[in-house]
Amino acid sequence: MEIGFLGLGIMGKAMSMNLLKHGFKVTVWNRTLSKCDELVEHGASVCETPAQVIKKCNITIAVLSDPSAALSVVFDKDGVLEQICEGKGYIDMSTVDAETSLKINQAITGKGGRFVEGPVSGSKKPAEDGQLIILAAGDKALFEESIPAFDVLGKKSFYLGEVGNGAKMKLVVNMVMGSMMNAFAEGLVLADKSGLSADTLLDVLDLGAMTNPMFKGKGPSMNKSSYPPAFPLKHQQKDMRLALALGDENAVSMPVAAAANEAFKKARSLGLGDLDFSAVIEAVRFSKED
Ligand SMILES: NC(=O)C1=CN([C@@H]2O[C@H](COP(=O)(O)OP(=O)(O)OC[C@H]3O[C@@H](n4cnc5c(N)ncnc54)[C@H](OP(=O)(O)O)[C@@H]3O)[C@@H](O)[C@H]2O)C=CC1
Ligand SMILES: O=CC(=O)O
């Protein structure tokens, strides 16, 4: 099976590498073309524009940073729309809002193409290990055709119905995750500032009902102020922003998520946007020292 792949950031690189390892033919494109080199060393082909990838491959996956990147790759010059046509499939696995996804769906299907949105839950390591959770919606036949690839990329693929539902589900999940991370960061800082061992707090949390892989995985490095980016903080803040907009649309009051969003914004203003989202703890430390 031949797959096109647009976007070789943290997630796209790991996911396309996985497809290559499992015997898929992969043709890649990335805005910064030099990031394709490592994939080419592992057997990928490279194209110079998204349009060329679409022309070459019947199914193309995109994993891009945010709504504006997802729209640009489809609508701009040399973009996806220039070559999409009857029978071709486009799967956008970026985390975006439903409105962006619906716009892309309308444009692709308007040219006879097929569209699935498939944002993923799980970070750099699950992407490397093929353990993502895929939240797909849209063209059912394309979803089914893509299962061999989804089975390599993830441990479970949900089909959620009409386009927009995948985007919304992903935003709900990441709203919960961002709120949890902010509460966790406050707990670690509170323990430390009140004279307790933040490492002992990790042990206590891990033994009780709140144990979870995120606290377990990120806690020790947060206590050492180390934030190698697996999920960039700027993307978590984007997801909080988009989830809050979904809350606005549906009149759902979300004061906890709104407060967490403020902490992620604060962290961005401190220049921490490219670090892992666990660096939000620095915003909590900063405000405690104000
Ligand atoms: N990292 C994670 O743990 C997870 C991330 N996600 C989501 O997946 C998506 C990708 O995340 P991640 O890989 O971490 O992000 P990165 O920041 O590592 O990569 C972003 C990618 O988008 C490309 N890009 C950005 N702007 C544009 C543009 N205007 N035109 C074309 N390409 C553009 C970048 O290209 P270039 O290299 O040229 O900058 C790069 O390939 C995001 O939506 C994120 O929210 C979902 C689950 C987990
Ligand atoms: O979107 C991020 C993730 O870890 O999932």
Image (cartoon, rainbow, N blue to C red):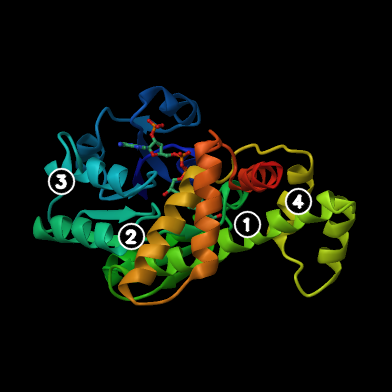
Which of labels 4 and 3 is toward the front?
4
Q: Earlier in the sequence, mark 2 or mark 4?
A: 2
At label 2, which amino acid type do we have? Asp
Separation of disc 1 and disc 2 at Cα? 22 Å
* Horizontal side, residue 33 vs residue 123: left or right: left
Residue 182 disc label: 1
Report the residue marked by disc 3: 81
Element on which disc 2 rests: loop
Which of labels 1 and 3 is toward the front?
1
Residue 139, image quadrant: bottom left
Percent of width and height locating residue 260: 55, 58
Q: Earlier in the sequence, mark 1 or mark 2?
A: 2
In this rendering, the answer to whether 206 lies above or below 237 is: below
Would you say the beta carbon of the disc 2 residue lies within 8 angstroms of ligand 1? no
Residue in the foreground of this view, choosing between 19 and 84: 84
Percent of width and height locating residue 259: 53, 60
Q: Earlier in the sequence, mark 1 or mark 3?
A: 3
In this rendering, the answer to whether 258 lies above or below 76 is: below
Report the residue marked by disc 2: 97
Q: Residue at x 36, y 32 (%)?
A: 30
Which of labels 2 and 4 is toward the front?
4
